[in-house]
Amino acid sequence: MPAAEVPVSVGLVRRLLDAQHPDLADLPIEVLANGWDNLVCQLGGELLVRLPRRALAAELVTHEQRWLPELAGRLPLPVPVPVRVGRPTAQYPWPWSVVPFLPGRIVAQRAPKDPGSTATVLGGFLRALHTPAPPDAPVNAFRGIPLSGRAEGVLEGLAHVADASDRAAALRVWEAAAAAPAWDGPPLWLHGDLHPANILVDHGRVSAVIDFGDITSGDPATDLSVAWMLLTAEQRAALRQAYGRADDTTWDRARGWALALSLAFLTHSADNPLMHGIGGRTFRAVLEQPH
């Protein structure tokens, strides 16, 4: 995991709240996650604080602050729209956010009770999200781009696949996806990082989508790759039907994106068993013969 570029701690969160949002400063603070990009702390019972650990993550926080308030109203699932915005200070150089605490556990840790309903809900969510983005929407150099931009990473990742038959099968999947025509529609709004650790389930049902730091615009196949991360072949068909706009070439690219992301998770998650597990399950799903 990348090292923090500045020290982040509960004490820093408390000092920033005291200076900028004093009405929240006396609430209990508990660390929930200290990930690649953010320190995430629960603030009382209803809020979270997201404090970037790296300059790259700070830019992503500003994207959430700018765009989630505009997008949330048309989405059929709750998303963490910032309720307070933090400013850089002499002791901390970047913007930060206070967001609602959305109840539930991530799907990677607690499977929904009805996977078929999950497929339909996620398909509907992506249909609502994937609308034309304005010219000033964020652009991500790694998500929403033509698959050719992921080729180097895929080939590097395949070199680490130990089983020769799996490696050959994955290469065939990649070559087929890379040969599919590129997205020729307008850049669409994308979540950009839609995987089972960014989807919540509560009382057995998908309840929210979180972590929009990679929000971007581009090819919807990037987000549709979640179908291979979470669902069986039959359930993937249900997601595609609920989504309603994925032609065969988009679906082929989505499978290629699933392969590319699975290899990235496997290659870069030696210290993160959760993401490594997502990568392994996705890789196996990608190698299944499509129905």
Image (cartoon, rainbow, N blue to C red):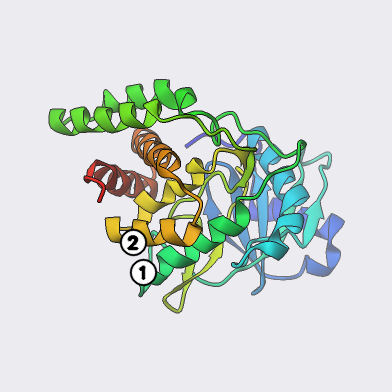
Question: Could you say which quadrant of the image residue 6 lies in?
Answer: top right
How much space separates mark 2 and mark 1, taking CA atoms? 6 Å
Give above or below for 158 relative to 188.
above
**Location of residue 267 in the rendering, given as x and y in whole percent from the top left corner:** 35, 33
- Left or right: 187 in relation to 201: right
Kind of residue sitting beneath label 1: Gly
**Location of residue 48 in the rendering, given as x and y in whole percent from the top left corner:** 65, 62
Task: Kindly identify which numbered label has been placed on residue 116.
Answer: 1
Task: Kindly identify which numbered label has been placed on residue 37.
Answer: none
Instruction: Report whether residue 14 is seen.
Output: no
* Residue neighbourhood size for the residue with mark 1, other residues' Cα within 10 Å, grouped as few (<14), some (14–19), many (≥20): some
- Left or right: 147 in relation to 174: right
Question: Could you say which quadrant of the image residue 63 lies in?
Answer: top right
In this orientation, which residue lies closer to the viewer: 216 or 103?
216
Which residue position is annotated with label 2?
235
In this orientation, which residue lies closer to the viewer: 173 or 59?
173
**Residue occupying the point 29% across, 60% down:** 234
- Left or right: 265 in relation to 192: left
Which SS class for mark 2? helix
* Circles 2 and 1 in contact, beta carbons < 8 Å: yes
Instruction: Report whether residue 42 is seen.
Output: yes
Which SS class for mark 1? helix
Kind of residue sitting beneath label 2: Gln
